Amino acid sequence: MRAWAARRAGALALLVLIGAVPAAEAQTADLVSKNAFRVCADPANAPMSVEDGSGFENRIAALFARELDLPLEYTWYPMSTGFVRNTLGADRCDVVMGYTQLQELVQNTNHYYTSAFALIVPKDGPLAGVSQLSDPKLQGMRIGVTAGSPAASHMTRLGLMAKAKPYDLFVDRRYESPADDMLADLEAGRIDAAILWGPIGGPLVKQGHPDLVVTPLAEEGMQPKLFYRITMGVRRSDHDWSRKLNSLIRRNQDEINAILIDAGVPLLNDMGTGPLEIGQ
C-alpha cells in the first residue's frame, strides 16, 4: 500500500532539526495561516480535487473554510514526487485533503471516511453481484486494474493476471486519466470488469456511466488490505492545528458523509467489513 499511497504524498523536506521540539512547535504555530484556510491540492485529480472547485474534496474544504470563517485558498501542485515538499513543507499551504492514514510524511488527523477498492461491471452483465475477487466467475475474465495497486497483488495471488489489462499508476492527471480510460474500455467491451479505488471509481460511474455498477471489495480477508481510512495531512509538528481539524471533523461528520454520498463515494464502516450505517 505504501507504494500506491505515495502518489498522494511525494517527498517531505523536514522543517526542523531532530531534538529541537520546543522551538519547532513554537515556530509551526505561526506557520498555520490565521487569515485563510490554505489547502494543498492537485488541480486535475477528478473526482477528488479539481481547480474549478467541483471535486468532493473541494466541497469538504469549502465546508471547513466556512466553519472557520476564513476564505479558502489553494496551492495547486500535481500529485507527484515532491508534492508535500513543495506545498505543505514549503509553508505554501496548511492541509492536504484526502490522505491515507499512517502516512509517515505528514501528521494524520483523525479519519473522516473509510472506503475500499471496488469492482465495476455492467449492471446487467454476468458479473453483476460478484463481491469478491475469489469468485469463480472472474476466472478467465479480462479485468482492468491499476498496476502496482493492492488489488493487483490479490489478482496475482488468485491467478487473474493472465488476461488482465494494467493501467498506469503514476501519471500527470492534467494530460492522462487511466481511470476514465479503464471505464471507457469496460463500456466498449475491451475488458469485462474494472477495479478502481472506490473514491475514484464510484463518483466517475455516478457522473457518467449509468449502466455500470460499483461493488466495494469489503469481503477480502487476505493481505494486502483493500480498504483504507482517509484523513487530512498536516505538518508533523502542527499538533494544535491537527486537534482543531479533528474537532471540525467530529462536529461536521454528518455533512461530510452527505457530501461523500452525494458524490458517489462508497463508504464503509471503520473496519472495512461492510457499508457505513449512517449515524455510526
Image: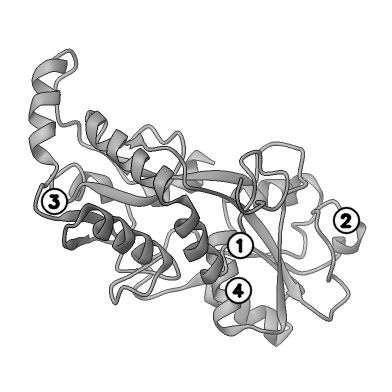
Question: Which mark is in front, 3 or 2?
Answer: 3
Relative to the observer, which residue lies in front, 97 or 15? 97
Circles 4 and 3: CB atoms closer than 8 Å: no
- Identity, as a three-letter code, of the amino acid under mark 2: Asp
> What residue is disc 1 on?
196
- Identity, as a three-letter code, of the amino acid under mark 1: Leu
Name the element at disc 2: loop
Name the element at disc 1: strand
Name the element at disc 3: loop
> What residue is disc 2 on?
135
Find residue 42 and report its horizontal and vertical position in percent.
31, 62
Question: Which mark is in front, 4 or 1?
Answer: 1
Give me the C-alpha separation between circle 4 and circle 2: 21 Å
Relative height, residue 45 to residue 70 (above, below): below
Mark 3 or mark 2, which has the lower sequence index?
A: 3
Instruction: Using the rendered view, name the quadrant where residue 239 is placed.
Output: top left
Q: Given the current orientation, which residue lies at the most extreme bottom position?
A: 188
Query: Position of 102 compared to 162: left or right?
Result: left
Circles 4 and 1: CB atoms closer than 8 Å: yes
State the residue at coordinates (43%, 37%): 110
How crowded pointer 1 is (Cα within 10 Å; few <14, some 14-19, many 20+) is rated as many
> What residue is disc 4 on?
182
Mark 4 or mark 3, which has the lower sequence index?
A: 3
How crowded pointer 3 is (Cα within 10 Å; few <14, some 14-19, many 20+) is rated as some
> What residue is disc 3 on?
92
Query: Position of 128 compared to 236: left or right?
Result: right
Query: Position of 121 compared to 128: left or right?
Result: left
